[in-house]
Amino acid sequence: MEHAIIVAASVIAAALAIGLSAFGAAMGDGQVTAKAIEGIARQPEAKGSIMTTMFISVGLIESIPIIAAVIAIVLVFANPFIK
């Protein structure tokens, strides 16, 4: 019985980790893009610099859900809490 509870809790934790990290990354990507567009509209001559910084930031933000997916896969398939 204890084994089933740990497995169920791990699956729920994995789903929450992926869902919340994807939501947070989507919100972050939206804010970064909105501010980049605003910056380009205010100062069009700095477009190249702003776009480069935006792409680097979006790439770093998107690494968070990838890390969460790895943690979720470990929780589901190689659970360290199961003896």
Image (spheres, rainbow, N blue to C red):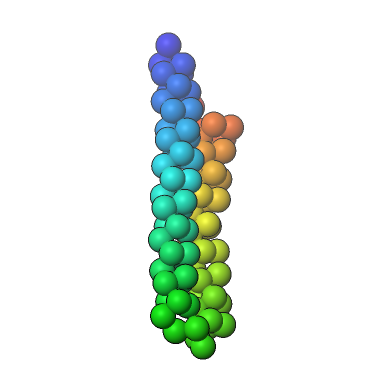
Residue furthest top as drawn: 1
Q: Position of residue 24 (x, y in %)?
A: 41, 50
Work out whether 1 lies above or below 11: above
Q: Position of residue 32 (x, y in %)?
A: 44, 65
Q: Residue at x 55, y 70 (%)?
A: 55
Q: Residue at x 47, y 64 (%)?
A: 33
Work out whether 41 lies above or below 17: below
Give whichever of 17, 32 is nearer the camera: 32
Residue furthest bottom as drawn: 45
Residue 6 lies in what quarter of the image? Answer: top left
Q: Can the viewer see residue 7? A: yes
In the picture, the quarter occupied by the N terminus is: top left
Q: Position of residue 23 (x, y in %)?
A: 44, 45
Work out whether 32 lies above or below 41: above
Numbered label tally: 0
Q: Residue at x 56, y 38 (%)?
A: 73
Residue 30 lies in what quarter of the image? Answer: bottom left
Give whichever of 72, 1 is nearer the camera: 72
Q: Position of residue 20 (x, y in %)?
A: 41, 42
Q: Residue at x 51, y 64 (%)?
A: 58
Q: Can the viewer see residue 80? A: no
